[in-house]
Every structure is written in structure tokens, then in C-alpha cells.
Image (tube, rainbow, N blue to C red):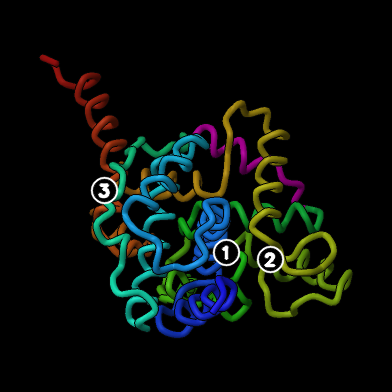
């Protein structure tokens, strides 16, 4: 059996047995493709030949490309899962990636926006135009819920429940969760859905169910959202870089700074493990220290 067939079997395994999201499947396929290219460059035609020495050479080449520890860790995890499938199907006798340890993660403090910076972003959209209404609704929803950009682009009209102010989000592994949103987001969404979205819909033959549409009337993509945010930053004269995940970081940081508990924020973000949410405590500790130093008489 050739590498391509193993790849197809792996994709099927991820989709059916692991219930992996389309984005996870894409990343795993890319990781597998890069590994197969490496094997061909080394003259390795049989996956049974892959051992610890081969893997060390592969990892060395990854580090030579200046890949981050996080990227290398993901590739190791992808290939470990791939060889686990091969071992189960008796293609290989054992999983050679089991003995490979993941590189220690960098734990940079997540970047976030201050309230003053956000206020500038909220004032740049022309709310008399369909695109301006869409951009405002998009910004309000991303900041108001902390959802991932992929979750945002997959939203349908029926995902929103204005009667109780919640949105149903399908996250990683197709896991669903409800996230509440506030009055600012609701006002922006209703304006867009009742006016701007109807006008955009007439421009194309795209999905009539997707919440956010592009200028051609078809569903908005993650890349499209990034371009929109970049344009909004440019129009606001801000000097900071804003990406969708930065709004997610901002959502979590602001909640914790205002007294929300870590478990609640974990649930809102859709993190499977609390450790993923704990990166935000670095920011809040810094915030608390500043308050202490500025407020305590004997600080």
C-alpha cells in the first residue's frame, strides 16, 4: 500500500472515529505530507523502516527550518496519532513516536487589547452601509463571546437566540456550547440581519443560512475576517496588530480582570482542559499587581 492510501485511511479515521473538525483534518494532512516528503528524500519507502533514529533526523530538519516548538509539537502529535492507527491495523509492530517527547512549550503571555483601543475599533464602521453593519456585528460578536474565528464563520442564522441572548457554537471536535452575548452585540446583529445582510444576500448565490456574508453575498471565510479586522485597525489609526484570536484573548482577559472565575471562562472559551485557560492568569496577576502598587498605602 502506498503513502497516499495510508493518508486517505488516516483522514477517514480522523473524521469517523476521532470526530475531528475540518481544520484539524487539514492540519494533520499537512503534517503527514511533510513527513512523507521527508521519507522520500531519505529513500525510505516502507513505514516499517521508521524508527527513533529516523524521527530524530526528521526533527532536526524541522528545527533547521526555524519552526516554533508549538509547530513541532503539533507535528509530533499528528504523527503519533497516525502511527497509532497503523499499529492498530497491524501495519507496523509498534508506534515509534511513543518514545518521542514533546518539546517544552513556550508560554508567552497572550496579547490583548485595552478598553481604550477597543473603543476606537467600535467607532470606525459606517453603520449606514451593509458592510459597515456587518463589520460592526462581527466585531461585537467576536469580542462579546470570545469564539474562535472558525466557529464564527460556521455560524448559521438559527445559531442565534435573541430571546435569551445566546449563540450556539460548534467548536473543536464538533462539540457544541452556548455562549451568552450582551445588548451591544444584539443591537449590532439585529441591525445587520434586518438590513445589511439582506442587501448582501441579493448580490450572490451563496448560502442563505450563513450569518456572515462577504461583499459578493457568499459566506465569509476566516481569511476574510482577518482582512476586515486589518482594515478596521487601519481606519482607526491604531498602531497595534489585531487578529481574531487577539479578540478572544481580550474577551478572556477582561472577564478575569472583572472577577469572573476561571472555570466559567474555561466553559465560555470551550477549552477542554483548565490548563489552556490558565495562561490568562498571568495577565490578571500583572493587572492585580498594578492595582496593588497604585492603591496600597504601603506598597
The answer to which of 140 and 207 lies nearer the viewer is: 207
Residue on which disc 3 sits: 278
Q: Residue at x 80, y 72 (%)?
A: 198
Q: Is residue 68 left or right of residue 297?
A: right
Q: Is residue 141 visible?
A: no
Task: For the residues labelled 3 and 1, say whether their Cβ atoms are less than 8 Å apart.
Answer: no
Q: Position of residue 195 (x, y in %)?
A: 77, 67
Q: Residue at x 79, y 75 (%)?
A: 206
The answer to which of 248 and 42 lies nearer the viewer is: 42
Q: Is residue 148 visible?
A: yes
Q: Position of residue 180 (x, y in %)?
A: 43, 66
Task: For the residues labelled 1 and 2, say whether their Cβ atoms are less than 8 Å apart.
Answer: yes
Q: Earlier in the sequence, mark 3 or mark 2?
A: 2
Q: Position of residue 193 (x, y in %)?
A: 70, 69
- Quarter of the image with the N terminus in it: bottom right
Q: Nearer the viewer, mark 3 or mark 2?
A: 3
Other-residue count near label 3 (Cα within 10 Å), few / some / many at <14 / 14–19 / ≥20: some
Q: Which mark is residue 212?
A: 2
Q: Which mark is residue 152?
A: 1
Other-residue count near label 2 (Cα within 10 Å), few / some / many at <14 / 14–19 / ≥20: many
Q: Residue at x 63, y 77 (%)?
A: 157
Q: Position of residue 205 (x, y in %)?
A: 85, 77
Q: Earlier in the sequence, mark 1 or mark 2?
A: 1
Q: Is residue 243 left or right of residue 76?
A: right
Q: Earlier in the sequence, mark 3 or mark 1?
A: 1
Cα gap from disc 1 to disc 2, whole angstroms: 8 Å
- Quarter of the image with the C terminus in it: top left
Q: Which residues are magenta?
A: 116-127
Amino acid at each position: 500500500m502506498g503513502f497516499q492510501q495510508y493518508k486517505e485511511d488516516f483522514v477517514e479515521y480522523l473524521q469517523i472515529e476521532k470526530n475531528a473538525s475540518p481544520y484539524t483534518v487539514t492540519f494533520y494532512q499537512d503534517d503527514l505530507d511533510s513527513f512523507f516528503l521527508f521519507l522520500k528524500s531519505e529513500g525510505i519507502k516502507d513505514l516499517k523502516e521508521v524508527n527513533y533514529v529516523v524521527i530524530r533526523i526528521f526533527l532536526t530538519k524541522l528545527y533547521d527550518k526555524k519552526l516554533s516548538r508549538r509547530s513541532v509539537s503539533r507535528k509530533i502529535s499528528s504523527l503519533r496519532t497516525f502511527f497509532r492507527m497503523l499499529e492498530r491495523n497491524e501495519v507496523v509492530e509498534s508506534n515509534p513516536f511513543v518514545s518521542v517527547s514533546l518539546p517544552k512549550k513556550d508560554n508567552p503571555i497572550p496579547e490583548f487589547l485595552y478598553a481604550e483601543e477597543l473603543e476606537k475599533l467600535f467607532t470606525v464602521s459606517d453603520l449606514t452601509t451593509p458592510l459597515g453593519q456587518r463589520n460592526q456585528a462581527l466585531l461585537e460578536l467576536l469580542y462579546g463571546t470570545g469564539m474562535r474565528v472558525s466557529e464564527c464563520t460556521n455560524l448559521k442564522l438559527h445559531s442565534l437566540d435573541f430571546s435569551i441572548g445566546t449563540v450556539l457554537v460548534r467548536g473543536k471536535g464538533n462539540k457544541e456550547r452556548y455562549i451568552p452575548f450582551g445588548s451591544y452585540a444584539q443591537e449590532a446583529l439585529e441591525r445587520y440581519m434586518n438590513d445589511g445582510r439582506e442587501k448582501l444576500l441579493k448580490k450572490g448565490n451563496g448560502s442563505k443560512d450563513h450569518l456572515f456574508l462577504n461583499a459578493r453575498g457568499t459566506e465569509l471565510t476566516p481569511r476574510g475576517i482577518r482582512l476586515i479586522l486589518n482594515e478596521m485597525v487601519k481606519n482607526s489609526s491604531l498602531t497595534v496588530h489585531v487578529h481574531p484570536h487577539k479578540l478572544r484573548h481580550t474577551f478572556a482577559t477582561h472577564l478575569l480582570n472583572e472577577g469572573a472565575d476561571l472555570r466559567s471562562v474555561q466553559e465560555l472559551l470551550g477549552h477542554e482542559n483548565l490548563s489552556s485557560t490558565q495562561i490568562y492568569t498571568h495577565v490578571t496577576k500583572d493587572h492585580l499587581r498594578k492595582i496593588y502598587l497604585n492603591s496600597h498605602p504601603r506598597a
